[in-house]
Image (spheres, rainbow, N blue to C red):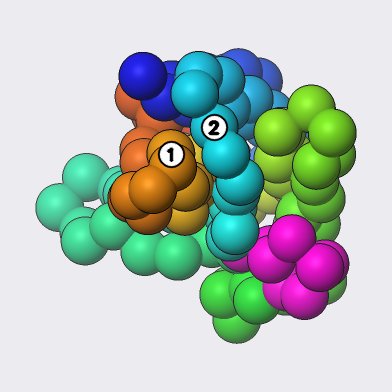
Amino acid sequence: QVQLVESGGGLVQAGGSLRLSCAASGSIFSINIMGWYRQAPGNQRELVAHMTTGGSTIYADSVKGRFTISRDNAKNTVYLQMNSLKPEDTAVYYCNADIVVFPRRNVYWGQGTQVTVSS
């Protein structure tokens, strides 16, 4: 019923940039928070950044000043611009969205996209 499709991952050298995109589709009534999480091997999944419909944002301390989250509410799409990438940013990045499929509200996840930063 609802799908989150991510794109934009890949391999980049330290100091480089990548832009992730995630588009939500399906029987969507409304979307509240959209954001990004990441999970490196052997680690727990952690919040990278999220944004409310109104534009309020939260970032992990480790990415502040380097990553920027944005949304296009008309397209049900969230973006993550990642600059000054570091090897420790290497992880699978997952899109996450709090979506109302009337009358129910659920959290949905994308399939994940690999980001690898070489030193």
Q: Nearer the viewer, residue 58 or 53?
A: 53
The quarter in which the C terminus is drawn is top right
Give the farthest residue toward the bottom.
Answer: 61
Q: Is residue 114 above or below residue 100?
A: above
Which region is colored magenta? 50-57
Q: Which residue is mark 2?
A: 28
Q: Amino acid at mark 2?
A: Ile
Q: Residue drawn 49% across and 23% down?
A: 27
The answer to which image quadrant residue 63 occupies is bottom right
Q: Residue drawn 36% across and 19% down?
A: 1
Circles 2 and 1 in contact, beta carbons < 8 Å: yes
| Apparent side of residue 45 relative to residue 18 in the rendered image (left or right) | left
Q: Is residue 119 above or below residue 23?
A: below
Q: Residue drawn 70% across and 40% down?
A: 78
Q: Residue drawn 84% across and 33% down?
A: 74
Give the farthest residue toward the left.
Answer: 42
| Apparent side of residue 90 relative to residue 79 in the rendered image (left or right) | left
SS assignment at label 2? loop
Residue 76 picture location, percent across and down = 70, 33
| Apparent side of residue 100 relative to residue 105 in the rendered image (left or right) | right
Q: Which residue is mark 1?
A: 101
Q: Amino acid at mark 1?
A: Val
* Residue 55 covered by magenta stretch: yes
Sequence-earlier tag: 2 or 1: 2
